[in-house]
Image (cartoon, helix red, strand yellow):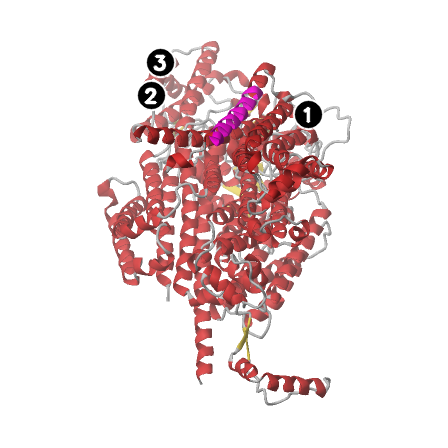
Amino acid sequence: MVLSRFDQQKTKHQLFHVSLSLATILICMAYMQYRRNWEHLGSFWDSLIVPIVFIGELLKVLLAHFYGRIEDGVLTAKQRQKKAAYFTPREILGGLTLQFLCTLLYAFICIILGAPVLGNYEQTFVLSLLMTLLTVSPTVFLLGGGGALQVCFCEKPEFVTKCEDTALNLFKYNALGGILGAWAGSVVAPLDWGRDWQVYPIPNVIGALLGSALGNIYACTHVLYATVRMYMSKKRG
Amino acid sequence: MNFTYLFVLIWLAYLVCSGVLLFSRGFLLARVSKTESSTCRRLSTNPNDEYVLSPEVVNEIFKDVNASSSSNLCLPQKSKVIILVIDALKYEFGVYKDNLTEPPLPYENKLKVLHELLSEKPEHARLMRFKADPPTTTLQRLKGLTTGSLPTFIDIGSNFASPEINEDNVIDQIVKSELPMVFLGDDTWTDLYPRRFKRAYAYPSFDIFDLDSVDQQILKHLPKELASEDWQVLIAHFLGVDHCGHKHGPMHEEMARKLGEMNDVISSVVQQMDDATTLLIMGDHGMTASGDHGGDSDDETNALLFAYSKKNRFYGSDAGSDSELLQQIDLVPTLATILGVPIPYSNLGLINFNLIPDVPVPHLSKFQTLLLHVWQNAQQIYRYFFSYALENKRTFNVDEMDKLETEFILLTHRVQTIYNEAAFKSFVRDLNVHLRDILNVCREIWVRFDPTQMSQGLLFCFLPIFFAFLLINNSRSADYGKIFKAKEISYIYLLNIAAGVFGYRYFKNFSFKTEEQGVIFFTSILSAVILAFYTLKHWTSIANNWSSVKRFSHMPTRLILFSSMAVYFSNSFVIQEAKILSYLLGGIVLLLAYELIQLSARLDFKQKFKAPQFLRSTLLRLILASLLAVCFIRFAFTLFRCREEQGNCTDFATQQGFVTKKSGLSRVYISAVVIIVIYTTLTRLYLRSCGNLTGNSPNVLLARYGPTVASICAGGHILLANSSIKNVHRVHIDAMALVIYALLIVQIVIVSWSPLMTFVLPPRNPNVISVNGKDSIVPEIFKKMKRMYEGDDAERRHEIPVVYGLATVYSSVIITFGVFLSMVLIVLLEPRAAIGLVASMAIGAILLSVNGILRYRTATSFESCVQPTFTALVGWFLLANFCFFATSHQTTLSQIDWRAAFVGRTTGLGQSNVISGALVILNTFCGHIFFFTVYALLSTETFSLFALFPNLIRSNSRLGKGDSATALSDVANESVGFDMTRGELSLYEYEDVFLGSNFKVATQFIMLQGLKIFCSMLACTIHCRHLMVWKIFAPRFIYEALATFVSLPSLILGYLLLLRIHRAVDSLIKRINKTKVN
């Protein structure tokens, strides 16, 4: 029973995915350690965090595509249709617009939650870009703009393949962890330690990264737990 | 009917409050005041007296200064004394700046006479910094200025009720020495010292808007008194400067005028006073840059002291006295020395010889005189300190006491061997150091705690919360009727009273300090046992219900709640609490929006996401409303008051460059008025659309016209009270506030008499066509034909009575009550703060509607539908706390808004301190009071929302397919199991569950508030030796304790209101049924 439910391909995909996420965040941390001074984290041109996260998310999507190729043979008509429309200008434009709107929404939320209204635009922009990258972008990259909207607002669409579904589940952990982490990052802001890394948006950026790392670790434990249970039952069998 | 729940609520509230009270008694411990008083043998210069100053006597004294015969001596009086107390005379006001390039600030160089006297006769005048001990409120300062002891923290609460001082003090000593005193000015003095003065011209310090009348009265009597010769001490206490600070701040033109007046007073006094008089001019405390006081910042503690003597020069700094700075407690021994009276028993200050006129004493050299004075002072302090230590054992550290005692014994030996001035100087230096050590030891110790009371307070606060959580939070609303039976509750009350009487009678046998502690201890223990018994009795059902709760549900909400409680444990969090709270509240609102998206988006859009549909959906509107709510929260940032620790706070800034306090921004006033009008209009529109403004029932009439009148009055009051127009009579401004108070009272009376806002349409006889002159007859005939054609339907309609506003029968009354309550709060608040209150109410309304829809979608039965979600509950709770900050309050003691005490009362109407206190409390805790009184809306609003917009039900229904053919009631029936379209009438139908779950919500709020105050108390306990405990943690605790004392009764009031409405609904329904049957 357990054996039949266990899907080796899916587990492999999940583990690779999670390790990619964790690696991205490790690289970010290593980069921050290398730069020592964290003040640049809020600037757009001077910080490599956003590009690193961007590349990490892209790699995850590529991974999903790689595993998706295996099941190419068993796609339904709708799924094929969706696949074919992936690189049309309409989809790309829609995806970009969606991400842009999302960045604006995050910036707005940052401001209504207490970021300065006048000034610190660059910092707010960097933070909201990072949030977009952690939450919406991977889904958009994977499914295109329209698909992402449907996944967010509708019941599970038919065109999502099994492999994409796996990735989407993991993206969810990533996104929730990122949002909660960025939100909770503010906890150090009021403290009177007088450190230079208490300045907005550094705690929130780091919080978002750590939060998504935690989310991934949580997902990873789930996968590992299922695997271990499978092996135990196999042994017993 | 269901008053059992009410009594359970009162019981729980009592338990939590008594725990808090006990803790505060232990934490904010007062110094044990000693009632002994000093006496002395007077060394007289009059040869007829029995103890005349002669060379033999002097020899005798200096043979052994420590002998009993030479202690307790009083040297002769040196001069008469005039004390001019100018309230809130800051040090900077008196400092003369020579080269002012810019135009001077309103307070600069206004007291020119001080400068002239100082430069003319530097030996006859002294200008010093007069350092007050916090709390810097007038009453506490007067106590400090007359007893010479350190103030204790708890005294601060008693500013409104001035009790007589029973500790030994310089005024009593003067009276005992039969030196006549005359007093003019602030009647706080005569409250503290009744019947001590030969003549007293006391005037109430009550009206802080009145800059002049007290001062003018003093000026009327002062010349006459100065001329008369029958006094030795004259005290005049001017209030104008302080009131000017409160009203306009130090940067206002009025301050220049008041200080100019004071300058004239001083120069005229200086002219009139005779040669043998010492003039002391002092401020009792300073003021912050905004003109307030009460805290312990340098601005508030640095007052001014100026001394002048015409003939005699002052002793210099030879005796080691500081010539720059005078501690306020040093005034008492100094004054006693000038007047030749014994130094009060509990004085801890040192004589400052810079203020004592150098009047030679016969047969004594100068240094001998000084030595005698100094040594008398030292002996008095030593006597007090060690008798205090002996009586209150374990107060002081034993090693430290030993060290101090050894030092003092060394000094007693050394004092015998002083025969020249050099030896005297070095001796005095050492002695002063030693006495200051004693002072510091006392200062440290008298902020001391009583651990037993504190721990008991913590325990007794925790136990009821814990058991209430187990018992009430984990039972079903319908079961409370079985758990709490009326009879049992009355037994519980009887038992508690018995325990209270027992504690009152036998508290000594259990070594409790006060009756209060005994009563609280026994009732709390007993109640905890009873609660535990109840919990055990119903354990099976509790365990069943508990097991059905998901283990990790509501995790983000719990996290937010946890963070809001964790604020108390760090001083930097307390400092930034306003922002943290708004961040958390914003988080709650966004969380609600997220839950809504999660739940309903998938229902709304099935398969395909369509933008137009999305744009039209309720979902988008709710999301936008939530964002709007967060925008309101963000907007409230501009209304927050800052505190000193935040830096760059204009209330405390010491640099120049900012304008007068509350600088008449007419923009703020106008927008406040506009917002108030919008608020009343919106509530009126809402009530009208619910059909609650139809008919002639008294509450309907009041709700129809009352808010309009109230908003006009509130707007008028705001504009007039803050305008610069001078010739508006104060009575007229007051009248507007009084109208609003009266409307609330009328509302309360009406609610208790006939609360309902419904209108029963009298049944019309369908067979008669009524036509009035204007209408044409044809349509009426057509209508009649149509009715006949429809047949039985019309008949049926005739049978069913039509009642307007029945669908919102509960919430309408609560809302109306809330409107009147909020109008009172608005008129009490400053205009800026009133905007904050309205913004908070808007946030509350959005919270209610989002929660209402969310609740309906997640509900599976009536019971779950009437119980608000945990997130909404926490959101409401945070909102009440957020409102405190949004209405420009801050948890510091110097930023209490005392102006509220005078709204509508400046003309001397009802000058009772109780009313003043109540008004200030209403102002400060307006958020708690308002939101907890109307808390029942959380469960009723779901129903009224769906009665108002029945279409919501269809769009929300889980089936979704709901084509127009199926009746709405069926759709609702299928999804939640009862007919939602009936609105709040369904609440009546399920009255057990409804009342039970409202009781549950009230208990949950009590638990949340209890948990909050518990965390605050715990933080104070943990941090009780923290550097910032008196500046940050203790004020925070005081505010939270007061908030608890206010919000628990508000909750009970809210529940009472609900019960009253329920009763009225019950009788209404019964009446209708009766007429139907007949």
Instruction: Inspect the image, locate mark 1, and give the three-letter code of the amino acid beneath it.
Output: Phe
Instruction: Inspect the image, locate mark 2, and give the three-letter code of the amino acid beneath it.
Output: Met
Which residue appears farthest toward the bottom when viewing the image? B768
Quadrant location of the N terminus of chain A in the rendered image: top left
Percent x, y of residue B390: 30, 28
Task: Name the residue beneath numbered marker 1.
Answer: A44
Q: Nearer the viewer, mark 3 or mark 2?
A: 2
Given contact means CB atoms under 8 Å apart, are the residues at marks 1 and 2 in contact? Answer: no
Q: Which mark is residue B410?
A: 3
Residue B504 counted in the magenta span: no
Percent x, y of residue B274: 60, 33
Q: Is residue B752 above or below residue B884?
A: below
Secondary structure beneath dot 2 equals helix
Read off the magenta span: A9-28
Q: Nearer the viewer, residue B413 or B620?
A: B620
Task: Name the residue beneath numbered marker 2.
Answer: B401
Categorize mark 3 by other alpha carbons within 10 Å: few (<14), some (14-19), many (20+): few
- Dot 2: chain letter: B
Q: Nearer the viewer, mark 1 or mark 3?
A: 1
Secondary structure beneath dot 3 equals helix
Secondary structure beneath dot 1 equals loop
- Are dots 1 and 3 on a single chain? no
Q: Is residue A35 above or below residue B988?
A: above
Give the CA separation, mark 1 to mark 2.
64 Å
